[in-house]
Amino acid sequence: MQTLLEMSLSGAVMIGVIIIVRALAVNRLPKTAFLALWGAAFCCLILPMRIPSPISVYSAIRRRGDFPMPVRNWQRTGLLLTGNVAREASVPSLSPWLLLWIGGAALLALIFLILHLRGRRVYAASLPVEQPFAKSWIEEHRLRRPVQVRYSDRIESPLTYGILWPVILLPADMDWKEEETAGFILAHEMSHIRRFDALTKWLLAAMLCIHWFNPLVWVMYILSNRDLELACDESVIRQYGMQSCPSYALALLEMEEKRTYLTPLSSSFSKNALKERIDAIMKAKKRTAAGIIGALVIVAAVVVIFATSAIEKQSEAARKNLLENLPVKNAGETADQDDGEDKSRELPADMDYVWNAWDSWKEGYSEDYTQEQYDQLMSMVKPEAYEGMSIAEFNRTINRIMEDDEYGGDSIYELYDTVVSNIPETDPNAGYLRNTIPASMEEYQSRVQEVYSGKRKDPSFSASAEKITTEDVFGDSVEAGQIWLDYEFTYRILDQDNLTVGERDAFLQKVMQTARDLLEADEVKSAAQEDMKEMLQAAGEKLSNDKISFTGCEVYNFEVYEREDY
């Protein structure tokens, strides 16, 4: 899945290619070819998923040897936060950039709405056209949808509005004596109706509201509207024949058209880019089979190359290592032997090194960390306003950060592991380092394993719960025993684009708090390990919602210690 910014950037690439093709072949290709290309660009900007293609431009520019995060042991005991820290973690903050985008989109949508409502007032004041020529022409070119022809003294050029009940609105001073010109106008507007251009303009307006910050989307909005007009011009010429080109071009000039500010969402017989339209009309050519095939090839090539995503390619040895979490034999290393059998995987020739879980033990970790290391780590792994980020965006971000192996000769993961292994629970970032990052990396790796194995793999989260039981001794509270619970639970992210990091972390906290609350029950002292599992399962399922669900749990250790057991 792509974020809005990623969709906007990849859509901009597609738009740039279409602009180049259009500049080179606007009068050589059928105008419907450009409408198809703009449709592909629209899908790039609106749909968060792409069809992978082996010849995609993104496959060509992808770095060789690009490899998903090797499996690392991210499973750590979760930290149950308390007080203000827990409330802070559960309330996501809105990024100022998100507020800016929402404000811009809302403002542009409001402008479109105001202009549309103003236009509706003009449309409502129009009257039916009673000219015999108009009635007979509409009757001869009848569509399944009923089409009205009306006139208004508040417009200067013809236009079309409405989707299910379309209306052709004409100027009140239109000269009906020039039947050829009137026929051209009605044919042009009927072409808009036949193609559902009113709906297309609404979709383009919605796209512009979403991607208002992208200048190339504004260019697309302008050029795609022009191409709607060019396509209708082409349709009129096919209907009336090539000999009608001079007369039709003259009709455009005689209209002295103006695109009124009242009709940004209507289809009009306007002089927007009039020169381009007249040039296209005068250079129009009869369609041939070769021309149609050439246009199909160009459209298909542009779409397959620029509107698709790269295919993730993994070597068999690397994929097996990812799925089975076995050590990989790196260049220059001797494989560990067990009963004479080499249990490592040979590394592909174009890969220098793959992390494995034994490296950290061979090299050893520092038992402590400096304040400088702590500050450096937090600056690298904690994005600003992360609580409001979607899980999809945040998990990709953290995975990329942890893939970076350049930090003072040591990997970021080793630095992270050193800090998180020694960080006190009272540290303000302890919850982020012990809960947020491990959960996100586990989610990312579970999803990768799911993709390559074809089997469902829910992320898991481990935690412990403890309760110290006390007894009153003449007013003093004396420790009388301890209840200890080690458990792991799995969950499923149902909406990765709308679930925020703050909401996911709050869900984890609720599950851990639920496990802790179970220890408060009176019957817990007589419960068995399997009983605790059933109680945690039942309580966890109640925490599920439409974005994230509790899918299972396992209790690994449940002990009730009385004072005499010590």
Image (tube, rainbow, N blue to C red):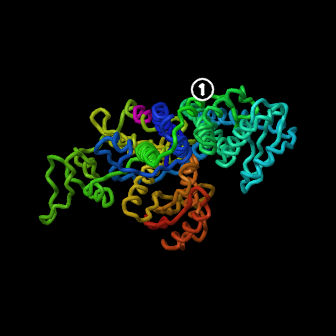
Q: Is mark 1 on a helix, strand or loop?
A: helix
Which secondary structure class fits the magenta region best?
helix
Q: Is residue 293 left or right of residue 270?
A: left
Magenta stretch encompasses residue 376: yes
Count of number-bearing discs: 1
Q: Which residue is drawn at 86% across and 43% down?
A: 130
* Residue 308, visible in the rendered structure: no
Magenta highlight on residue 275: no
**Depth check, front residue: 539 or 346:** 346
Q: At 72% across and 29% down in the image, what residue appears?
A: 255
Q: Can residue 554 be seen in this view?
A: yes
In the image, 171 versus 485, the foreground residue is 171
Seen at 83% across and 45% down, the residue is 132
The x and y percentages for residue 273 are: 61, 28
Q: Give the range drawn in magenta.
A: 374-379
From the viewer's side, name the closer residue of 477 and 309: 309
Question: According to the image, label 1 marks what residue?
Answer: 275
Q: Image point 58% across, 55% down: which residue?
A: 547
Q: Which amino acid does label 1 sit on?
A: Lys
Give the quadrant of the C terminus: bottom left
